[in-house]
Amino acid sequence: MSGGDDDTGPSKTTQVSSLDFGDPLYLHASDTSTTALVSLKLKGTENYNVWSRAMTLALQTKNKFGFVDGSCIKIQTDNVLMLQWDRCNSVVLSWILNSISEELFYGQVFAKSAQTVWEEIKETYDKIDGSVTFNLHQKLNSLTQGNSTVSDYYHKLNALWKQFDALVKLPTCVCDANKEFKTHDDLIKLMQFLMGLDESYASVRSNILLIDPLLSVKTAFSILSREESLRLSSHSSSFGPGRNQNSAFLVSKTFDNKRRIGNGPNPNLKCTKCRKLGHTIDRCYEIVGYPLGGLKRVILNLP
């Protein structure tokens, strides 16, 4: 009997330690039950899709998604691997429990299978009803820049767009209608972005809306982001009354000096708005507005 025990001990150690890194049964030293895979807590239907996506990515990174989709099957013919499967299952179950709200935790804490909990959560909260769609659509249409930067405002809006696109899954197609639908979708997003901007950007917004065809929302964001950076730079580097005009003049003068010193405008850059060489549409003065010096040269028709 003791001889059998001696054979079992080394065998158990050898089998578990020899598991390959790509094996779902392999556990890294950092794979503990206290690890928080995602910072987002599942609350219910309102954020299930985001939570599910985040958890799926995290579990795939850990090579443990097989414990929730059923592809990693428990081997019944090897006691050592059976115990290792149980251990991995417990770790994955702990990760799930650590990522749900306290109210949901008490309903799942006595479960024994990570797959069972995953499927039950999906069955309960993977619901797309009118209230969820309404709440998300309301957030989209009521979001404004407020005291946020243009960048923060855009990224918040972009996150809501992605959530809405994931929530309202439309059939895919390769016909011309798909292209027309994307054009319409881009138009809606551009209008939502421009409507929520602070009124201090009204003139830039008006210039963007005059462009035909309309810009993509990403290009519009790039233009407004550069305008914001210029304003912040002008405000921090100038003092006294008229500092914004003086800064605009200095920026324009510096730009002109570089053009005179260099070999002229970059022929590889062409604006799709004014059709001139040397800059792209996100730097076009006809959209972002002319600085004092640049406006003066336009009026006097100077080079």
Image: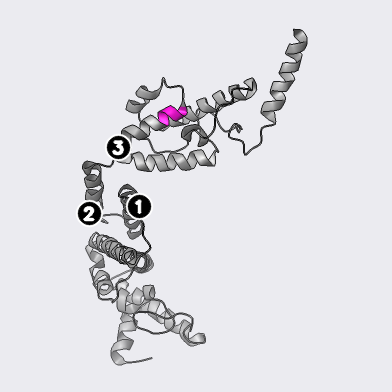
Residue 287 occupies quadrant: bottom left
Q: Measuring 49% from the left and 81% from the top, which residue is drawn there?
A: 268
Where disc 1 sits, the SS reads helix
Q: Is residue 85 above or below residue 274?
A: above
Residue type at tag 3? Thr
Label of residue 73 in the image: none
Q: How would you rate the neighbour count of disc 3 (Cα within 10 Å): few for under 14, some for 14-19, many for 20 or more?
A: some
- Location of the N terminus by quadrant is top right
Q: What residue is pinned by disc 2?
A: 141
* N-term-proximal mark, 3 vs 1: 3
Q: Is residue 167 above or below residue 234?
A: above
Alpha-carbon distance for marks 3 and 1?
17 Å
Q: Nearer the viewer, residue 92 or 7?
A: 7
Q: Position of residue 171 (x, y in %)?
A: 33, 54
Q: Nearer the viewer, residue 245 or 159?
A: 159
Type of secondary structure dominating the magenta stretch? helix
Q: Measuring 75% from the left and 16% from the top, which residue is drawn there?
A: 7
Residue type at tag 2? Asn
Q: Position of residue 53 (x, y in %)?
A: 41, 43
Q: Position of residue 225 (x, y in %)?
A: 36, 65
Q: Position of residue 37 (x, y in %)?
A: 47, 36
Residue type at tag 1? Lys
Please tell me whether mark 1 or mark 2 is closer to you in this view.
1
Q: Is residue 112 above or below residue 194?
A: above
Q: Is residue 91 visible?
A: yes
Where disc 3 sits, the SS reads helix
Q: What residue is pinned by disc 3?
A: 45
* N-term-proximal mark, 1 vs 2: 2
Q: What residue is pinned by disc 1?
A: 162
Residue numbers of the magenta segment? 114-118
